[in-house]
Image: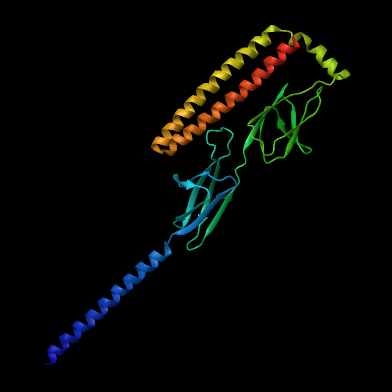
Amino acid sequence: MRSLMNVALCVLLFAAAYGQQDADSVSTADSSRSATVATAVIIETNVEGARVFWDGDSVGVTPLTINVEPGRHFVRIIPPDVQNWLSDIVEDSIEVEPQTHRSLTYNLNPKVLLLSTPSGAQVLAGDSVIGVTPLVVSTSRPSVRLKLQGFEEDSLEIANTDQRIISTHLKKTWNEDAEDISLNASDERRSPLRIYMAGAATLIAGSAAAYFKVKADNTYSDYQQTGDPGMLSKTDRLDAAAGIALAATQLSLGLFTYFILTE
């Protein structure tokens, strides 16, 4: 009888120990699950409808709320006007903490290409020179001024403009210095070779711009059908190439017109 009671006691002790081990396993699993609980991330942009890529995957358009796991992540924001080669693409790397809420706000400031005839004019924002024409600038600046020796200063409003290319023809100032410069360069300006070269450059650059733009449109159509991020990156590169070729076309055309008028 005593042996039977000892066996029963051993069975009870074993069952209690096994139950405690199982409870510890469940507790550990619950703790692990709690540590990896998703974190809410809110993503906003100053221009609604921007496409959001999270760790390379398209997750929607702004404003957007997504649930992600803690850790370091890579975010890429593409403006709604994705076919515009002057669109400002934002890339960022962020650290998401467990069981916290993150709010991310990005400014997508569009850009404009400034062209002047003649080119090489200084572009000033306030009293600071930020470059020479042709120049790409952000529309976050309210206005800029163009200065070139021998020509009148010109002021351009660029804030909130819908234009992507702003071109201006600088007016000559007929002072003594400008006349001396004009006389010294008169023989070169009358050279027909410059006219031919400017015309040829305009045709070549225009053809290149059209070619890259058509390729970009075709690639973007493939992206819409497949959703492959690689196609979107290729579209961005082709749009950038088309934009550069377009800028070269505008510059060559300006020079061609200038040479014709001064011949």
Above or below for 124 versus 23: above
Residue 244: x %, y % from top left: 59, 26
What is the tally of numbered marks visible in this picture?
A: 0
On the rendered structure, is 22 left or right of 246? left
Above or below for 232 versus 100: above
In which quarter of the view is residue 88 placed? Answer: top right
What residue occupies the far bottom of the structure in this picture?
1
Residues 126 and 13: in front is 126
- Residue at image position (72%, 16%) is 258
- Residue at image position (85%, 15%) is 180
In which quarter of the view is residue 121 placed? Answer: top right
Residue 141: x %, y % from top left: 70, 40
Residues 5 and 87: in front is 87
On the rendered structure, is 128 left or right of 91? right
Quadrant location of the C terminus in the rendered image: top right
What is the image's colouring? rainbow
Above or below for 35 versus 68: below
Residue 110: x %, y % from top left: 62, 38
Quadrant location of the N terminus in the rendered image: bottom left
In which quarter of the view is residue 119 placed? Answer: top right
What residue occupies the far left of the structure in this picture?
1
Residue 204: x %, y % from top left: 57, 16
- Residue at image position (75%, 12%) is 262
